[in-house]
Image (tube, helix red, strand yellow):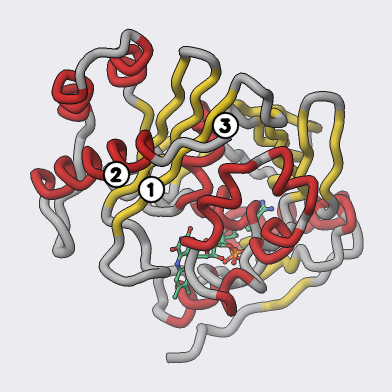
Amino acid sequence: MKAPDFDYLLPASLDAALAMLAEHGGEAMPLAGGQSLMPMMNFRVAAPEVLIDLANLSELRGISIEGDTIRIGAMTRYAELMADADVQKHIPIFGLALPHIAHDAIRNRGTIGGSIALADPAAEMPALLRALNAIVEAEGPDGTRMINADDFFLGMFETALDGELIKALHIPVATSEQRFGFHELTQRHGDYALAGVAVVQTSNTYRAAFFGVADRATRVPDLEQALEQQDDMASVLEHLGNIDFTDDLKANHTTRQRLAGVALKRALKGMTV
Ligand SMILES: Cc1cc2nc3c(=O)[nH]c(=O)nc-3n(C[C@H](O)[C@H](O)[C@H](O)COP(=O)(O)OP(=O)(O)OC[C@H]3O[C@@H](n4cnc5c(N)ncnc54)[C@H](O)[C@@H]3O)c2cc1C
């Protein structure tokens, strides 16, 4: 199927894009890589009357080190992240995770900002940002808001954005006390995960964010605490029971809980610096 008719706008600056967004309100949607939005329009899951293409916004591009943080523009594509030396050095968990996101063709167009804004519960990037304790920089009519990734994902395809655009992501650079783990289980390589987890260990503290298991990227404080206390694995896995697991045609909640446990054990076993 083809997408329903829409008007196409190509702003030259972030201010112009925000003005267009404010003018058209709920009838407009930003367009980044189009790898989710265009299929959604073709399937009539989304039918915006106006598309505001972010392609020419230089304010949403670039990767830079700012003190102990790496700032990544929202329009940075997965393929650019995979090729960037600073990202490889300072966010090593991206090297573990990015090859699992879709396929080359989609990684060549899909953007980090698009993934975060979409908030697909099975996507890798929201969980990575929660595990990394990242900050989302949002720009709106009232200025800039810095939103902790823990407060950003409100539910399935639902975020804390309020008439705003994601401008950039701020991610703490890796330190010598940190180790990283990542594992996901899919039916085929490149598919969305049935269950997966991103783990960041800093000295003896843990941040473990699961994806594909519930309505959003999910951390379980009791489970992280059990890891910190070095509880036996059976006790750690019991805390997965705190997750409100998704039931769907691909896997019921019991299967998903088992898969989440397998993913966690494998991620912990493969922890790297
Ligand atoms: C076959 C296939 C397999 C895939 N597999 C995976 C996978 O395994 N894992 C995974 O994570 N993803 C997967 N994807 C999705 C892919 O990663 C998308 O590229 C990504 O989710 C959205 O990025 P995008 O840049 O294409 O955004 P778009 O599709 O352009 O936009 C997505 C949404 O975000 C909004 N948006 C975009 N940018 C901004 C911004 N800066 N500020 C505010 N709102 C914004 C748009 O309005 C839209 O609602 C797959 C897609 C396909 C087609």
Contact, CB < 8 Å: mark 1 with mark 2? yes
Residue 73 x, y percent position in the rendering: 77, 49
Q: Is residue 226 above or below residue 14?
A: above
Q: Which element carries disc 1, helix, strand or loop?
A: strand
Kindly report which numbered mark, 3 or 2, lies closer to the viewer in this rendering.
Answer: 2
Q: Is residue 31 above or below residue 113?
A: below
In the image, 40: left or right of 95? left
- Where on the image, by quarter, is ligand 1? bottom right
Q: Number of numbered discs present? A: 3
Residue 218 x, y percent position in the rendering: 36, 34
First-in-chain label (3 vs 2): 3
Which residue is the extreme one toward the top?
229
Quadrant placement of the C terminus: top right
Tag 3: residue type? Leu
Kindly report which numbered mark, 1 or 3, lies closer to the viewer in this rendering.
Answer: 1
- The 10 Å Cα crowd at callout 3, few under 14, some 14 to 19, many 20 or more, is many
First-in-chain label (1 vs 2): 1
The answer to whether residue 50 is visible is no
Q: Which residue is mark 3?
A: 132
x 41%, y 34%: residue: 209
The answer to whether residue 230 is visible is yes
